[in-house]
Image (cartoon, rainbow, N blue to C red):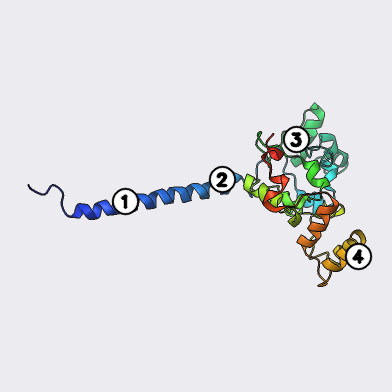
């Protein structure tokens, strides 16, 4: 019986098997990269807005507190967007004829709110409460980054489920004294003396001696103290903060 396939078919078959495996692996890799890319997450993507509002100018330059505009951040799930009259409380006196602020003046005249494009848009199936995070010692920086260095606001973190869970499993890495919640420049390393004073003031003598034994209080050490003070559970993967019902209700 004559040979049907040329001997080279064996090589072709092996190449196609290995090639198919590499193609499948490549597809998975590309899919993973796309899912984590700014194209999907919008991280560091500046969105068009009706007014090019600069957090860098207002927060860092003028020293305006986050709560001046985001008034409900301490009591509500929603941080709140400032109504037009909040903007005009200043801009009725300065930059009154600026073309850049024409939409703000029009909004006030027509009694019609500005339509901002959301930068942080949590899916409808996820519940997020600003108030509980702020009151438990999570600073604005942990989610929003150095907003005071953003000429135009962008999304600093992916806000993915994995990213949220990492914080919920190890909240001590992100906790800070409540008086430093809105201080975007604050860090344990930069304010070590203030951290030691806080620990000495708030902790019992035994805890203070333990935390400051090496003349340095780390973020994790401070976070553990704050977790106890603010009643934040810290049990690694078994913490109730990782229960699905916390975010998916």
Label drawn at residue 194: none
**What secondary structure is marked by label 4?**
helix
The disc, 4 or 1, on the residue closer to the chain's N-terminal end is 1
Q: Position of residue 138 (x, y in %)?
A: 78, 50
Q: Residue at x 46, y 48 (%)?
A: 28
Up-down relation of residue 152 to residue 246 (above or below): below
Q: Verify CB contact (< 8 Å) between mark 3 and mark 2.
A: no
In the picture, measured across the screen, residue 67 lies left or right of residue 152, that is right
- Residue located beneath label 1 in the image: 17
- Residue located beneath label 3 in the image: 103
Q: CA distance from mark 1 to mark 3?
A: 61 Å
Q: Position of residue 53 (x, y in %)?
A: 75, 44
**What secondary structure is marked by label 3?**
helix
The disc, 3 or 2, on the residue closer to the chain's N-terminal end is 2
Q: CA distance from mark 2 to mark 4?
A: 51 Å
Q: Give the class, few, some or many, for how many residues have Cα within 10 Å of label 3's Cα (few <14, many ≥20).
A: some
Q: CA distance from mark 4 to mark 1?
A: 68 Å
- Residue 61 in view here: no
The disc, 2 or 4, on the residue closer to the chain's N-terminal end is 2
- Residue located beneath label 2 in the image: 39
**What secondary structure is marked by label 2?**
helix
Q: Verify CB contact (< 8 Å) between mark 2 and mark 1.
A: no
| Quadrant of the rendered image containing residue 11 | bottom left
| Quadrant of the rendered image containing residue 183 | bottom right
The disc, 2 or 1, on the residue closer to the chain's N-terminal end is 1
Q: Position of residue 171 (x, y in %)?
A: 74, 52
Q: Verify CB contact (< 8 Å) between mark 3 and mark 4.
A: no
- Residue located beneath label 4 in the image: 205
Give the position of the C terminus as an image quadrant: top right
The disc, 1 or 3, on the residue closer to the chain's N-terminal end is 1
Up-down relation of residue 245 to residue 219 (above or below): above
Q: Residue at x 33, y 53 (%)?
A: 18
């Amino acid at each position: 019986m004559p040979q049907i396939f040329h001997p080279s078919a064996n090589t072709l078959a092996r190449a196609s098997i290995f090639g198919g495996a590499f193609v499948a692996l490549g597809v998975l890799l590309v899919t993973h990269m796309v899912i984590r890319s700014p194209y999907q997450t919008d991280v560091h993507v500046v969105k068009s807005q009706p007014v090019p509002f600069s957090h860098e100018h207002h927060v860092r330059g003028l020293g305006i507190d986050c709560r001046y505009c985001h008034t409900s951040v301490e009591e509500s799930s929603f941080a709140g967007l400032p109504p037009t009259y909040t903007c005009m409380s200043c801009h009725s006196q300065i930059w009154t004829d600026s073309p850049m602020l024409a939409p703000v003046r029009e909004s006030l005249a027509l009694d019609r709110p500005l339509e901002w494009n959301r930068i942080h848009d949590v899916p409808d199936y996820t519940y997020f409460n600003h108030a509980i995070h702020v009151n438990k010692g999570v600073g604005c920086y942990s989610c929003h980054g150095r907003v005071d260095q953003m000429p135009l606001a962008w999304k600093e973190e992916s806000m993915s489920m994995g990213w949220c869970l990492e914080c919920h499993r190890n909240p001590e890495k992100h906790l800070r004294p409540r008086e430093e919640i809105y201080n975007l420049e604050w860090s344990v390393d930069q304010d070590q003396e203030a951290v030691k004073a806080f620990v000495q003031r708030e902790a019992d003598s035994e805890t203070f001696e333990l935390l400051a034994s090496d003349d340095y209080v780390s973020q994790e050490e401070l976070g553990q103290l704050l977790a106890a003070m603010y009643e934040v559970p810290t049990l690694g993967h078994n913490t109730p903060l990782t229960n699905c019902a916390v975010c998916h209700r």
